[in-house]
Amino acid sequence: MNIDPQLLSIIVCPACHGALSPATHGGADELVCQGCGNAYPVRDDIPVLLVDEARKPA
C-alpha cells in the first residue's frame, strides 16, 4: 500500500469520524478505524471510504 502520509493525516472514518491507520491482513490492504473498527479496502493505492464496502469488526 502506497498512500501519501499527508492524505492519511486528513482522512477519517466516514461512519464515526475516527482516525484511520494502515493494516495488512492476509495480503489485503486496508485502513482500519481506531474508533468503530471498520476496515476499509485500499484498491490500487486508493482508499475506498464507503461504509457499504467496509469489513465490519468481529
Image (cartoon, grey):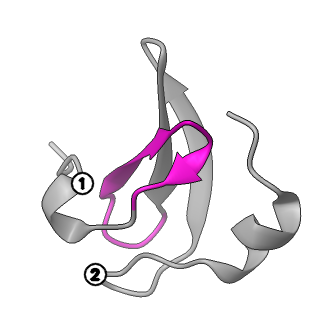
Of 43 and 30, nearer the camera is 43
Q: Are marks 1 and 2 in contact (CB under 8 Å)?
A: yes
In the image, is 9 to the left or to the right of 55?
Answer: right
Q: Earlier in the sequence, mark 1 or mark 2?
A: 2
| Three-letter code for the amino acid on which mark 2 is drawn | Ala
Image location of residue 53, percent across then percent down:
20, 54
Residue at the far top in the pictured view: 26
- Res 38 quadrant in image: bottom left
Q: Residue at x 48, y 80 (%)?
A: 18
- Is 40 part of what is drawn in magenta? yes
Q: Residue at x 62, y 42 (%)?
A: 45
Q: Is residue 44 above or below residue 55?
A: above
Q: Residue at x 42, y 12 (%)?
A: 26
In the image, is 51 to the left or to the right of 26?
Answer: left
Image location of residue 54, percent across then percent down:
24, 54
- Helix, strand or loop for disc 1: loop
Q: Residue at x 86, y 70 (%)?
A: 6
Magenta range: 34-48
In the image, is 51 to the left or to the right of 16?
Answer: left
| Three-letter code for the amino acid on which mark 1 is drawn | Ala
In the image, is 25 to the left or to the right of 50?
Answer: right
Count neighbours of disc 1 (C-alpha within 10 A) and say few if under 14, some if 14 to 19, many if 20 or more.
some
Of 31 and 49, nearer the camera is 49
Image location of residue 2, percent across then percent down:
76, 39
Image location of residue 1, percent across then percent down:
67, 33
- Helix, strand or loop for disc 2: loop
- The dot on residue 38 is none
- The dot on residue 15 is 2
Q: Is residue 17 above or below residue 38?
A: below
Judging by the rendered image, the residue that carries numbered circle 1 is 54
